[in-house]
Image (spheres, coloured by chain):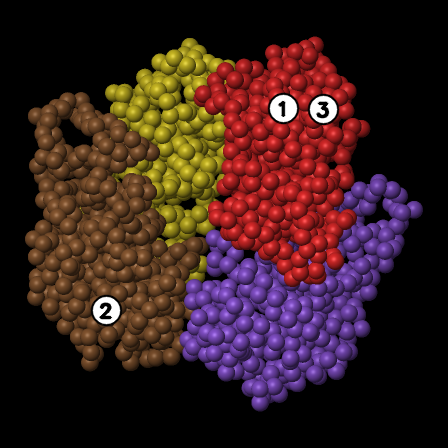
Chain colours: A yellow, B brown, C red, D purple
Amino acid sequence: MLKQSFTRPPMGWNSYDNYDTNINEAEFLRSCEVLREKLLPFGWEYAVIDIQWYAANTASMRDRFQYIPFGQVAMDAYGRLQPDPVKFPSSAGGRGFAPIAEKVHAMGLKFGIHIMRGIPRAAAHQHLPVLGAEVTADMVANPSSICGWNPDMYGVRDTPAGQAWYDSIIRQYADWGVDYIKCDDICNTNLYPSHFEAGHEIDMLKRALDKVERDIVLSLSPGPALLEQSWRYCEDANLWRITDDFWDDWKLLKDMFVRCERWQDHVREGCYPDCDMLPLGTIGEMFGNGKRISNLTPEEQRTMLTLWCIFRSPLMLGAKLTGGALDSETLSLLTHEAVLSMNLEGQKARQLFRNDREAAWRSAGPAGDFLALFNLSDEPREVAAPLQSPAALSELWTGASLQAEGEARAALPPHGCALWRVTKL
Amino acid sequence: MLKQSFTRPPMGWNSYDNYDTNINEAEFLRSCEVLREKLLPFGWEYAVIDIQWYAANTASMRDRFQYIPFGQVAMDAYGRLQPDPVKFPSSAGGRGFAPIAEKVHAMGLKFGIHIMRGIPRAAAHQHLPVLGAEVTADMVANPSSICGWNPDMYGVRDTPAGQAWYDSIIRQYADWGVDYIKCDDICNTNLYPSHFEAGHEIDMLKRALDKVERDIVLSLSPGPALLEQSWRYCEDANLWRITDDFWDDWKLLKDMFVRCERWQDHVREGCYPDCDMLPLGTIGEMFGNGKRISNLTPEEQRTMLTLWCIFRSPLMLGAKLTGGALDSETLSLLTHEAVLSMNLEGQKARQLFRNDREAAWRSAGPAGDFLALFNLSDEPREVAAPLQSPAALSELWTGASLQAEGEARAALPPHGCALWRVTKL
Amino acid sequence: MLKQSFTRPPMGWNSYDNYDTNINEAEFLRSCEVLREKLLPFGWEYAVIDIQWYAANTASMRDRFQYIPFGQVAMDAYGRLQPDPVKFPSSAGGRGFAPIAEKVHAMGLKFGIHIMRGIPRAAAHQHLPVLGAEVTADMVANPSSICGWNPDMYGVRDTPAGQAWYDSIIRQYADWGVDYIKCDDICNTNLYPSHFEAGHEIDMLKRALDKVERDIVLSLSPGPALLEQSWRYCEDANLWRITDDFWDDWKLLKDMFVRCERWQDHVREGCYPDCDMLPLGTIGEMFGNGKRISNLTPEEQRTMLTLWCIFRSPLMLGAKLTGGALDSETLSLLTHEAVLSMNLEGQKARQLFRNDREAAWRSAGPAGDFLALFNLSDEPREVAAPLQSPAALSELWTGASLQAEGEARAALPPHGCALWRVTKL
Amino acid sequence: MLKQSFTRPPMGWNSYDNYDTNINEAEFLRSCEVLREKLLPFGWEYAVIDIQWYAANTASMRDRFQYIPFGQVAMDAYGRLQPDPVKFPSSAGGRGFAPIAEKVHAMGLKFGIHIMRGIPRAAAHQHLPVLGAEVTADMVANPSSICGWNPDMYGVRDTPAGQAWYDSIIRQYADWGVDYIKCDDICNTNLYPSHFEAGHEIDMLKRALDKVERDIVLSLSPGPALLEQSWRYCEDANLWRITDDFWDDWKLLKDMFVRCERWQDHVREGCYPDCDMLPLGTIGEMFGNGKRISNLTPEEQRTMLTLWCIFRSPLMLGAKLTGGALDSETLSLLTHEAVLSMNLEGQKARQLFRNDREAAWRSAGPAGDFLALFNLSDEPREVAAPLQSPAALSELWTGASLQAEGEARAALPPHGCALWRVTKL
């Protein structure tokens, strides 16, 4: 059963930004340990294994391919993908991710996985049986429905046999103990520009989730999500990406203000437009070019957290956690309770204005409004927003206090922000 | 001041569908009399004078132009458009629409007018002064911002002088006693495909409205409105067209189901996506091809009303009212209290499903849910929607009652519908 | 070797319009007999086997699929497609189409086949070796490059191994005795709108053809071809489709006037923009809905032939030839020597004018200009074109003669044409 | 009468790149003197006055507008634009540009002017008479057809009165002695994306030109020209811009290789796709930011000249000529006879290959082929093209000679080129 409502956007950690296709069981569990110890107390509860956990030799051709074409994938007799036994030894004997889920749950965390829309190409070409269907995988797969950037799957036809396929995999994931599914190549299927081809597959996922007892969060990728499908995303899923992959680049961060503007009307309980993972700390280690420290400056990092939190985006951390990689500055940013409270408690966030140089947002909180001012320019800049009555302003990041009348004004460094709790005097 | 919230979508009558550019004072006031007598008791309260009330000789070149290029328009010394004194004699002596508004109000009705985005081209070419601005109209008008289908105006620059222009006209309309402004060429400015060029003019209208005491409804045309601007429409205006001009044509009516699907998440108190006027009864009289009775069949008319009401679209009637033109079937349709109550009281309307042959909608009402089934195909067809528990179904149009379990099912004629109030047993 | 220059556009017969995917050896050879006897004397020399000659059971799921997804295809050890041995028994023992080609050549005809761009999906998934390459098919195939409407192939990467693949198949076709290759899914790959993805595969085909001794005509499909690639088509190929599939429908025929207008500058020796096959006589027999007589009226048929011939399109007949299906009216149309001479000898064809109701074309011939007037409207209509000097006009279809000065004028039935040889007096 | 064929692309000088809207009579005639003395002997023969010669006070609001909206323009009683008498004193008394044309002709040069598509907005709003038409300008002008970037004109309707308008202005220009008309806002009217709106105006210009005795070259702007209209450009005009405004920026120069690739099939006698003016020497003086020396490096300048000349683009110089501004390096580039001979004599220029890093072109000349290799990358690079037989290579820019077999290879600096005359050994 799909967990229909949350009191807040999901928070957690995802393996992609650091490990690409190459997270393995040991490293994942070590990451969970750090997550439990350092971040869980602040609400970071999901631990998610990202793309191609089912694929063999994923790092072996990294100079040429992120995803090896026509490579070997682990499947059961019904074409359902299984963890690659080399990367995830505990999956041996058909146990799937159940052993890992059990350990994750024991830590008080929740367990998530990434999946690709559709059915394995290999299953279709091998005419494998589909559990619960009378036809084989070649009749379930649509040979014209592919992912533009990953070679593993075909889209699924809108038929009872297609529904049986999705029922069969969701049943398996529920049995394993999965709490969170990030389904990729389904939110914006950008190979098919004329119309949205995969809407029926989102609906089928929802129906399959309704048939299992387990509460499972459904996250849709990639973005940019389509506004004309907003009603469907909210009906069927819990979060959906409003951007293509977000990385540690000011240009992308600045662009997120445009995206949040467009989606501001669509945040409601259980429905969270998603600004994507937080590329903080150490990232990129397994992408073939060596690891790096996030390119975002401290100002940009605060601007990012402020926007994500006032907009109420899901918060999924991309940073490497193991080996002491989680530095204290990053940790401090991620555990700032006053700021996180806005993500938890804010209501009716609205952009007050935006142009190429500045922006402002306001949302309502239980102890006064939140007001955020942003300097989007590359120069120091004063930014101001009107106040309807004299107010006390308490800066959340710094703790500084002041009183103001008429407007709230801040001198901001390039790409910087101010974030106040506003209480009427 | 903009009237920020309504308890229901506005209802009324508009001159366009029958009179094109040629409504005059006498005919308008006669129409208001019929409106007052026959429809006001059922909530139809706005009477709106549509396009080119300021233009002279509007019918004189109807075989070649709907809008005469570079034709004569009535303006005051500040370039503000005035009613054409031939069509609206009471406007003589600079009284504008005040005398008409007074009579409309005396009938218990509210008075609306149509305006075009921008400033008259004639004012710009004549370098007329702008009330409250230090520059003349040639500096306020943007010569590259035109309407693609009407030759009267230039768009206005996003400057203090531009704001002064909008302030000056809104002040005039408030002084006249205008209750409702339908601003055209502003919701979707389809000559400028790369980006939304007129957003700042919507904002300027809103700011001007905030400066006057009078409550004035703001309606934006034409559609299709842009989903990426939905937040702005709702912030600044009260209703906005989600379709290009709607006429009495099944193809357009069927297409409205697609539009309502996309906008279903955007209906909220004070914010009403608008399906456009109801082309019922006698229409088209002044368009140059003779008048006609609406081409919509009785089934299609009920389908139209049902969709508009469950979706909670504004209801603006296009039918000719004078000379006994309002036939009893049309009148009966427009005064069906059970159906209108859905437009008044419905909440959280959602499309249950839609494909090329059928659709279903549900909304919540104070005395049970509303459930509408539609046959979109050209053949008789049974349409069904699931029921979560055994229920009593009362058909609103016919009054027929039945009990059902598991699903509500109806045998529908082509383009027909069923509309039930559903109460749990 | 690519046949670099022709003295005229190719003429012949193609199996598709009547047989879909289901032409077989016996029926093809019977068709060739009729072609040889009735049409070869007038220049119709190519006999072409169209799509999926390599696929098994092609008609078995015709109610659901034109092309069975993940169906069985005949391949050799190197993944090269072979004729399905059930449909083409003489191909047994690895002889391919060589026995059929030999018989076709013996009749004085030339032999053509249809191929799909790329390498079989089955070869890629099975990691088959590629003749002359060091890597296997999974490294040659691009998993993101598919055909939007046929499930058989993957596109080929722009690498030496990719070139080896194309070399290996062209070598095989040359060895078989193929004279004409119609390569599909390569001229306009409409799944990939952002840029032309398959240009490198056109180049690779050309390079492969340059390496064999045999003269082979290269025809590219489907259309509409892209004007920005016109230089490449002409450099690499002999004909290319300027339209999506053309059928017996006036709307498509009228639309061809737009296409010919755009491509008129691109007809030159050896380079022929292609208006597609002539859907005349009996067609459609194997498409699952029964055969039909062409829906084009006699007037439309003459208009089609006139446009194709003055524009100098290739002429490929789609009509069923066997069993006496080729009626005498169609035969007479196809053997009209005066009209065909225009296709053979015309030079510098130019559209004189075109609007929604009429069009005119002129080209230069050895014995005077050709002038064609077309009535594109649905009513009888007089159409005229200016003459620069007094002239004798000889109507090619009817043989009628007249003299004219100032203009050539004809009273034409709906969709009809006049076609004159113009000689100065 | 339109000068239908040239033996070579036109060469000359244009006022725009240095003077924007502000060239005046004295400065223009001084420029002509330099042109006559330094460049005419090498073929540079046209002297063209660019945009807004009819507009008053053109430089007075340069900080805000390039073209003053609703500004004052000089017209005669029929709405025909006249030179601004302040900038062009000799035009007083209705003499127009005749006195200037006479002086230009006396220097052995040819005289060109820029015009905007359409009829002055002022003429339409004032309902001025149109010479030779029975209706006034308000019926000739199309109020929906504007230029997206210049406020002066309305497009003209496709009617006899519209043709009379174009006849009246072309007759005036012919009477003045104009040899070259650069018509702007007509080649690509980019405000109207759905279809080409101004094609009829190109045809009307052509018809008007056919009615006068004077040979006048017709040049169409702006680009990028539309390939689907190539037949029309060539039928009606002599040159047409294949690019938006070209300036001294490597990015634009590199992009020109894409444009030349697409248009390579369209260069023929009398028909010249136009790469735009050469921004060499001193430019930009009157654009409001001060003058500058061309930002193109010496290597880029040679690359530009090489591409323009092998492609056979028209050559119109943008450099300031007066006051000694024409430096010796620029002059030497513009008078390099061996390179210019390629522009004069080259035939059948073809791109051999192009990718992001390199490109090669070949054309046929009377004394051997021309072969150009380009390094499009930002690093030094060896570029090579195949030779079909052993050949002597003579570098045109440097005069260096060598012999080569199999391929011609050059080590090129970033953005540099080699240009050889190739003669078989």
- Circle nearer the N terminus (1, 3): 3
Residue where numbered disc 2 is placed: B170
Is residue B146 visible in the rendered structure shown here?
A: yes
Q: Which mark is residue D177?
A: none
> Looking at numbered disc 2 in the image, what kind of residue is underneath it?
Ile
Callout 1: chain: C
- The Cα–Cα distance between marks 2 and 1, rounded to whole angstroms, is 76 Å
Q: Residue at x 57, y 84 (%)?
A: D87
Q: Residues within 10 Å of mark 2 (few under 14, many from 20)?
A: many
- Residue B62 x, y percent position in the rendering: 34, 64
- Circle 3: element type: helix
- Residue D93 x, y percent position in the rendering: 58, 89
Question: Same subunit under labels 2 and 1?
Answer: no
The residue lying toward the viewer, choosing from C272 and B185, is C272
Residue where numbered disc 3 is placed: C37
- The Cα–Cα distance between marks 3 and 2, rounded to whole angstroms, is 84 Å
- Residue B176 x, y percent position in the rendering: 17, 71
Residue where numbered disc 1 is placed: C321
Question: Same subunit under labels 3 and 2?
Answer: no
Is residue A218 visible in the rendered structure shown here?
A: no
Q: Residues within 10 Å of mark 1 (few under 14, many from 20)?
A: many
Extreme residue toward the right, this view: D425
Q: Residues within 10 Å of mark 3 (few under 14, many from 20)?
A: few
- The Cα–Cα distance between marks 1 and 3, rounded to whole angstroms, is 11 Å
> Looking at numbered disc 1 in the image, what kind of residue is underneath it?
Leu
- Circle 1: element type: loop
> Looking at numbered disc 3 in the image, what kind of residue is underneath it?
Glu
Name the image quarter holding residue C178. top right
The residue lying toward the viewer, choosing from D286 and B205, is B205
